[in-house]
Amino acid sequence: MDKLAKASNTIEIIKKYNFTFQKRYGQNFLIDTHVMGKIMDAAGLTCDDYVIEIGPGIGSMTQYLCERAGKVTAVEIDKDLIPILNETLMGYDNVSIINEDILKLDLNEIIMKDNNGKPAKVVANLPYYITTPIIMGLLEGHVPVSSITVMVQKEVADRMQAGPGSKDYGALSLAVNYYSSPHIAANVPPNCFIPRPNVGSAVINLDVYDTPKVMVRDEELMFKLIRAAFNQRRKTLANSISGAMTLDYSKQEVAKGIAALSLPENVRGEALTLEQFALLSDRLSSGRND
Ligand code: SAM
């Protein structure tokens, strides 16, 4: 089937339906077949895969997904796109379209119904205004997904992949690394989209672990410590944690925990690995129970 992702085909559909792009829905359609191929390769799809696509738009990426995967569920918020999708995807019998807000949908239930609860792969050119809630919702919500391959803002991809000591390293890097192994598969310039976004983009693949990368006694406490550490990046870790409204540790208690990890007392959060945050969390929680 001729590819909708060719600029001329996308423009033809948009004109035919008199479609108006909605900025509030982050509508920047991908018009580059080469980039589509790269996304498919990064997702490593086979005919055994069940794919969830978030925001199919006019169905350009959905076409590729239908051709490579066994079954596709595409979730689109904009009701004006539904009649377009019904036409552009008419030739495929392995796709279902849901007109819903992805943030309000119970994906666990959909995966249970459509794939007997077996892990899905998520593939999407995401609406950038809700990238973090979508990804964190999938990971923290323990939705059964084996991988997430998505186009995101370049800066967000860099933050997800960053390691200790880099300027991009932060709470998002640690959360993503706790649940998955991230890998940037391609950088994508604004001229690959219509309309052109104001920012650069990147395709990132998150290979989701069966169990989180590190063992920690109190996951909630560890993420509170992480958020506190990066809320005020310029402060020392001891000051950030002891000063956090969400936590109740004295500076002495935190200093003791930091010393037990053989870290300098003036260390900043940005120097700690995920494993070290987990150890600190275990130390602080056991200190309380002694
Ligand atoms: N997949 C298409 C492509 O690659 O050309 C369109 C990608 S466009 C960046 C993002 C899509 O997500 C749009 O179709 C938009 O309407 C849809 N969208 C925005 N917010 C959404 C939400 N909360 N739930 C589901 N879809 C959403």
Image: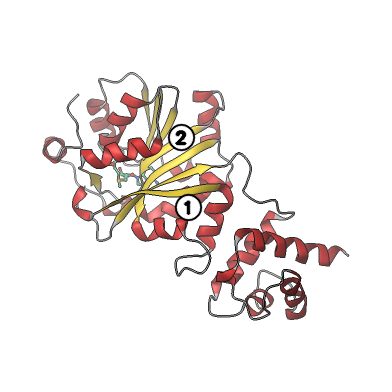
Identify the residue under disc 1: 133
Q: Is residue 133 above or below residue 280?
A: above
> Which percent across, then down, holds residue 269?
59, 71
Q: Please say which color scheme the image uses.
A: secondary structure
Question: What residue lies at 46% left-to-right and 34% top-to-bottom?
Answer: 121
Nearest the viewer among 100 and 131 is 131
The residue lying at 59 percent from left, 42 percent from top is 142
- Position of 195 with respect to 148 (left or right) is left
Going by the picture, which residue comes out furthest to the right? 290
Image coordinates of residue 279 in percent, x first then y, are 71, 61
Q: Ligand 1 is in which quadrant of the figure?
A: top left
Tell me which residue sits at (86%, 63%) in the image: 289
Number of other residues with Cα within 10 Å of mark 1, as a class: few under 14, some 14 to 19, many 20 or more: few
User: Which residue is label 2 attached to?
Assistant: 121
Work out how far the residue at label 2 is from the one at label 1, CA to CA, in angstroms. Answer: 17 Å
Identified by mark 1, the residue type is Pro
